[in-house]
């Protein structure tokens, strides 16, 4: 176990805790850069989804994980960003300008949706954002002049300053870069007074207010920033999916985004990325298992001569091919996460790291929280 | 000009007049305590001052300015910080982050400079940290600096809340039952700290308190309330001997 000696206040403000942490993130960046060389096109495409979902996760993490406001309508912001970007691209606006306009439009929508949030909390805010998402989906369907309605809207590959992101690998790098930038900017906000004000609102509005936090202003800023990041993700999403249709941005998608941050671990940016890995990679993993499990078990059966193993393998394969199984597994994992690890995948990761760094001395109760029954809710 | 003044303060909750025509003034450098049985309206007065409630009648003046109609978040900017009876800390943040939030009114960085973490933001953060470290030294909280508030024992949270209020750099400190839930030794420490806050930091203190030993030890003047109405005002000894106060407490 290492001890960190602090000699300057600047040390607590740094992006990375110490040199070693920075080095590990460097290794991670190196792996991300090298992956397109090592993996096939299919896998690169799937990992690109991780990056796009990661940006979505950051958006919701700021709102739900840090400011404590819930939103059941974030797919609508993703849709607004995607449609706006696609529309302006069709008009011949350059890529960077088009993304900027899309982000501005979603930010404006975020502020408008955020206004009721100044008065509502909890379940009421969830219902308001849900209603917003339903309205927006209807707008996508009916406003055919812009969105193309049910006929949908094709989105071309991005062209930035004359460079065409033609293949999977180049778009992969673009998404990775934008994810890294979004992480950096968000972390900057979180380590300054804006981020502290958000956390304060999440934990105790009344104390935040008494300490001088303008509740309405900071809640609006949280909604606007969250929507802006979602709009940015929407622009990349449009290119990735290549064909926009209104039914993509459904309530279920909003809920899936919410699950992403909960599974990842509320209250940490790393959690947003962990959640994105889970949401983006679970379907392809199930798809691989569908064939891999029966095949390996069949070869195992022929090697040992026990026919029952092959039959079980075929059974599992057939089960995984049934419609709805993917959603079922998704739900099952969610239930398990909430029951076993409320801090999410990131919480588990932190425990794992502590286990190895303190190896023989690890105490299971290190993370046990005392329950606090003294807090008053009556002024809410 | 009086430092802090409440004039004919009143508030109704439905048919109940929780605070009824209360007037008092706090002088600069004074420890002023409000006492009274449960439900006398002490905390309600605090909530009126921090603008959580809107008074039905009366005025609040701080350094000559009328703060009766001011939005709640502006109160801290003026230099009035408070603690809560049932600790209202930011549970899932570290003690350091809690105290840094106390510096919120002193920030001078905008959203976009924070987004880019410009050198000015970095300088500001270090400045905040230096101010917070002074409070940490003052209240001897060094060992809890990086601990999550949710994991701190009750006594430490009580002091942490005091520390957060002090980080704000207030001129008037509102303490809502600083000794509730503390043991004898911790209450004694609290008494010393309140004296130090007044004598060393020059902060005036307005306090709600039940522990008469603490009240007598640190208060310059005491206001006794019952059913929202003032009973007596004066030195702790005078108020304790006042027949109305004795009747309110003992029901004689």
Image (cartoon, rainbow, N blue to C red):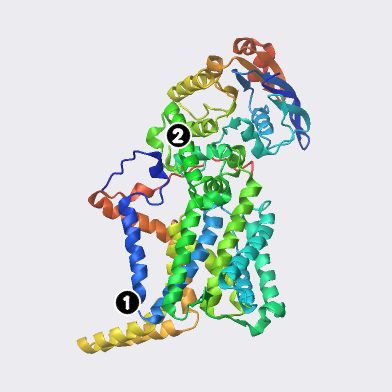
Kindly indicate the quadrant of the structure image that contains residue A254: bottom right
The answer to whether residue A342 is left or right of residue B236 is left
Q: Quadrant of the C terminus of chain B?
A: top right
The answer to whether residue A333 is above or below residue A316 is above
Which residue bears the numbered disc 2? B130
Tell me if I can see residue B133 in this picture: yes
Q: Contact, CB < 8 Å: mark 1 with mark 2?
A: no
Chain of the residue on which disc 1 is drawn: A
SS under mark 1: helix
Residue A38 - label: 1
Rendered residue at 30%/49% (across/down)? A363
Rendered residue at 47%/53% (across/down)? A187
The answer to whether residue A194 is left or right of residue B246 is left
| Front residue of A363 and B117 | B117
Rendered residue at 63%/64% (across/down)? A106
**Count of marks placed on residues:** 2
Rendered residue at 47%/64% (across/down)? A179
| Front residue of B115 and A66 | B115
The answer to whether residue A229 is left or right of residue A280 is right
């Amino acid at each position: 176990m290492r001890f960190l000696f602090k000699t300057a206040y600047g040390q607590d403000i740094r992006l990375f805790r110490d040199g070693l942490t920075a080095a590990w993130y460097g290794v991670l960046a190196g792996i991300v850069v090298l992956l397109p060389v090592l993996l096939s096109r299919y896998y690169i495409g799937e990992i690109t989804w991780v990056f796009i979902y990661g940006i979505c996760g950051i958006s919701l993490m700021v709102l739900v994980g840090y400011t404590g406001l819930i939103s059941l309508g974030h797919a609508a912001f993703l849709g607004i960003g995607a449609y706006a970007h696609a529309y302006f691209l069709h008009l011949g606006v350059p890529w960077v300008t088009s993304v900027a306009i899309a982000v501005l439009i979603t930010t404006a929508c975020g502020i408008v949706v955020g206004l009721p949030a100044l008065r509502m909390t909890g379940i009421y805010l969830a219902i308001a954002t849900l209603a917003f998402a339903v309205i927006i989906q209807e707008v996508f369907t009916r406003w055919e002049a812009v969105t193309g309605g049910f006929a949908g809207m094709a989105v071309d590959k991005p062209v930035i300053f004359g460079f065409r992101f033609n293949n999977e690998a180049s778009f992969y790098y673009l998404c990775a870069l934008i994810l890294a930038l979004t992480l950096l900017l968000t972390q900057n906000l979180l380590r300054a007074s804006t981020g502290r004000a958000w956390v304060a609102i999440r934990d105790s509005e009344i104390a935040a207010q008494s300490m001088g936090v303008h509740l309405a202003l900071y809640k609006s800023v949280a909604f606007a920033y969250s929507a802006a990041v979602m709009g940015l993700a929407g622009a990349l999403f449009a290119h990735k999916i290549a064909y926009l249709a209104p039914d993509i941005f459904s309530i279920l998608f909003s809920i899936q985004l919410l699950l992403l941050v909960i599974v990842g671990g509320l209250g940490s940016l790393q959690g947003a990325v962990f959640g994105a890995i889970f949401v983006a990679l679970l379907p392809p993993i199930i798809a691989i298992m569908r064939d891999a499990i029966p095949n390996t078990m069949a070869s195992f059966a022929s090697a040992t001569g026990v026919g029952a193993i092959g039959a079980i393998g075929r059974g599992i394969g057939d089960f995984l091919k049934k419609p709805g199984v993917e959603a079922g597994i998704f739900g099952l994992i969610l239930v398990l996460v909430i029951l076993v690890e409320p801090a999410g995948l990131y919480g588990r990761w932190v425990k794992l790291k502590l286990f190895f760094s303190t190896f023989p001395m690890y105490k299971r109760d290190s993370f046990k929280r005392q329950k606090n029954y003294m807090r008053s809710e009556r002024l809410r | 000009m009086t430092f802090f003044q409440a004039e004919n303060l009143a508030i109704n909750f439905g048919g109940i007049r929780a605070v009824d025509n209360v007037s008092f003034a706090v002088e600069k450098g004074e420890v002023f305590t409000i006492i009274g049985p449960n439900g006398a309206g002490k905390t309600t007065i605090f909530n009126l001052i921090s603008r959580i409630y809107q008074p039905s009648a009366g005025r609040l003046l701080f350094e000559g300015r009328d703060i009766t109609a001011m939005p709640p978040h502006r109160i801290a900017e003026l230099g009035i910080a408070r603690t809560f009876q049932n600790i209202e800390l930011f549970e899932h943040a570290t003690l350091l982050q809690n105290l840094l939030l106390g510096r919120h009114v002193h920030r001078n960085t905008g959203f976009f400079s924070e987004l880019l973490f410009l050198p000015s933001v970095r300088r500001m953060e270090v400045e905040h940290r230096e101010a917070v470290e002074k409070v940490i030294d003052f209240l001897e909280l060094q060992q809890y600096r990086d601990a999550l508030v949710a994991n701190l024992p009750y006594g430490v949270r009580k002091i942490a809340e005091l520390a957060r209020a002090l980080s704000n750099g207030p001129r008037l400190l509102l303490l809502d039952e600083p000794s509730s839930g503390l043991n004898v030794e911790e209450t004694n420490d609290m008494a010393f700290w309140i004296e130090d806050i007044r004598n060393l930091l020059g902060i005036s203190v307005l306090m709600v308190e039940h522990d008469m030993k603490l009240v007598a030890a640190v208060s310059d003047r005491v206001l006794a309330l019952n059913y929202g109405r003032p009973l007596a005002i004066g030195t702790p000894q005078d108020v304790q001997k006042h027949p109305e106060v004795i009747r309110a407490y003992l029901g004689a």
